[in-house]
């Protein structure tokens, strides 16, 4: 009988019980295990029969985390080699999710966590004889500022790029190159793969949808540009499913070895396409919270937004050096460009198919946010500063880095 995580929604329970999935390793380690994706990955590994799953993260698990006898939560720093080495001992596979994500961390922290932390995982696996690593990567590692309009992985630029749009993307690319045996680190006979989603959403999302809903609820959000940009979404369960299938593809002679794959909601997007119209779909969630439709407000032209972003970045660099402005060049770019992918490679090499369809997943996510996020929403949002939880994790990571 399948054991189900107590925080699951009906769709998540249905997806976990109505399909027979291949076996998972007995002993699993998930770095970044208390994040949105990490928590769900741990749960799905247990639901699929793992005997032991160890979560490793810089912060403790939330109070709502699944307290299952086969789950062990360890608090530690990915930049601390001894801690990484200790947690990886005995693992059959490591899912390396730990990362400093987004554009708001101190610059040196990205290199410490995303690059050096990945090298720590590689070296600890070599020292302890762990033969499999699935790395969580990002399509932003290949973004150049040009529209990504239905490309495959092979049609995107090869790493390393001459220039990256943000430090997060640069350091994730650096870590990915090391993990896939294309960098300076000898990965020996470790079997590795990198799997990335695009725009993860779902119940318990604490970054993407909360930030945009907060901006809408406080009256600050407007449609960027014409609002016709095409992007793709990935339900958190679909991404974790892709990460788990990544492990199954790690065997000698596999076509997936040391390669990069993108998984999304695929053709379950509207009209059987692999994309949606971002601002139209986002407005469904905004209206679902009872907020005013952003299409009833004035749209902001791209030239105006990029101008404001330039001013914001100047102020952050030279005047308000300890202040974070949410509006920056990268955010304006990704909210106006086409960003969707053809996931045929993951379907072919990993056997990936979405286990939760976009329409059902998005509708349920809106209901979840209305019931769980909206009651505690306060109209105190600002163009500067980060959410308290995000800032707290940044502070903890930065403090750990300084203590090295």
Image: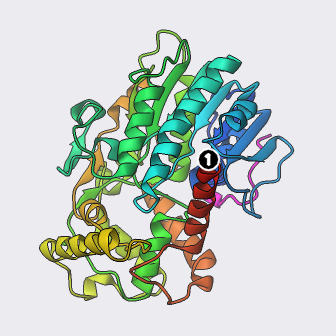
Q: Secondary structure at mark 1?
A: loop
Relative side of 392 to 264, left or right: right
Relative side of 342 to 187, left or right: left
In the rendered image, residue 2 lying in the magenta stretch gets the answer yes
The quarter of the rendered structure image containing the N terminus is top right
In the rendered image, residue 371 lying in the magenta stretch gets the answer no
* Residue 40 shows in the view: no
Please identify the quarter of the rendering in which residue 79 is found.
top right
Can you name the residue that lies furthest to the right here? Answer: 69
Q: Is residue 374 above or below residue 321?
A: below
Residue numbers of the magenta segment: 1-11
Q: Nearest the camera: 164 or 15?
A: 164
Coordinates of residue 72 in the picture (x, y in percent): 80, 44
> What residue is rendered at 26% in x and 71% in y?
314
Relative side of 106 to 72, left or right: left
Q: Is residue 224 above or below residue 395?
A: below
Please tell me how crowded label 1 is: few (under 14), some (14-19), or many (20+) other residues with Cα within 10 Å: many
Coordinates of residue 192 in the picture (x, y in percent): 51, 23
Coordinates of residue 203 in the picture (x, y in percent): 58, 63
Q: Which residue is mark 1?
A: 32
Relative side of 127 to 331, left or right: right
Coordinates of residue 50 in the picture (x, y in percent): 75, 33
> What residue is rendered at 65% in x and 59% in y?
10
Q: Nearest the camera: 260 or 126?
A: 126
* Residue 329 shows in the view: yes
Prevalent SS, magenta region: loop
> What residue is rendered at 33% in x and 57% in y?
270
> What residue is rendered at 47% in x and 68% in y?
209
Q: Is residue 28 above or below residue 75?
A: above
The quarter of the rendered structure image containing the C terminus is top right
Can you name the residue that lies furthest to the top here? Answer: 253
């Amino acid at each position: 009988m399948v054991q189900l995580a107590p925080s699951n929604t009906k769709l998540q329970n249905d997806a976990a019980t109505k399909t027979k999935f291949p076996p998972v390793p007995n002993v699993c380690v998930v770095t970044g295990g208390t994040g949105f994706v990490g928590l769900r990955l741990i749960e799905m590994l247990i639901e699929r029969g793992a005997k032991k799953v160890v979560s490793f993260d810089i912060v403790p698990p939330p109070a709502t985390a699944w307290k299952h006898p086969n789950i062990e939560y360890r608090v530690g720093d990915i930049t601390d080699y001894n801690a990484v080495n200790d947690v990886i001992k005995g693992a059959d596979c490591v899912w390396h999710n730990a990362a400093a994500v987004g554009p708001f961390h101190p610059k040196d922290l990205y290199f410490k966590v995303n690059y050096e932390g990945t090298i720590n995982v590689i070296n600890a696996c070599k020292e302890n004889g762990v033969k499999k690593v699935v790395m969580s990567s990002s399509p932003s590692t290949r973004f150049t500022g040009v529209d990504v309009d239905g490309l495959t992985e092979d049609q995107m630029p090869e790493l390393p790029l001459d220039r990256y749009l943000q430090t997060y993307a640069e350091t994730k690319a650096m870590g990915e190159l090391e993990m896939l045996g294309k960098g300076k680190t000898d990965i020996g006979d470790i079997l590795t793969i990198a799997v990335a989603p695009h725009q993860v959403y779902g119940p318990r999302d604490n970054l993407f949808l909360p930030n945009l809903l907060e901006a809408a609820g406080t009256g600050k959000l407007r449609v960027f540009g014409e609002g016709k940009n095409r992007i793709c979404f990935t339900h958190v369960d679909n991404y974790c499913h892709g990460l788990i299938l990544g492990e199954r593809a790690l065997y000698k002679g596999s076509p997936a070895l040391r390669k990069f794959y993108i998984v999304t909601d695929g053709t379950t997007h509207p009209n059987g396409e692999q994309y949606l119209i971002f601002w139209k779909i986002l407005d469904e969630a905004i209206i679902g919270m009872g907020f005013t439709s952003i299409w009833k407000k004035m749209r902001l032209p791209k030239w105006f937004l990029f101008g404001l972003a330039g001013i914001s970045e100047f102020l952050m660099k030279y005047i308000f050096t300890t202040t974070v402005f949410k509006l920056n060049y990268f955010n304006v770019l990704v909210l106006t460009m086409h960003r969707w992918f053809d996931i045929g490679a993951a379907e072919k090499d990993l056997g990936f198919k979405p286990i939760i369809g976009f329409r059902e997943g998005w509708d349920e996510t809106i209901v979840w946010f209305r019931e769980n996020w909206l009651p505690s929403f306060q109209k105190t949002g600002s163009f500067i500063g980060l959410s308290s939880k995000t800032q707290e994790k940044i502070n903890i990571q930065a403090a750990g880095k300084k203590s090295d």
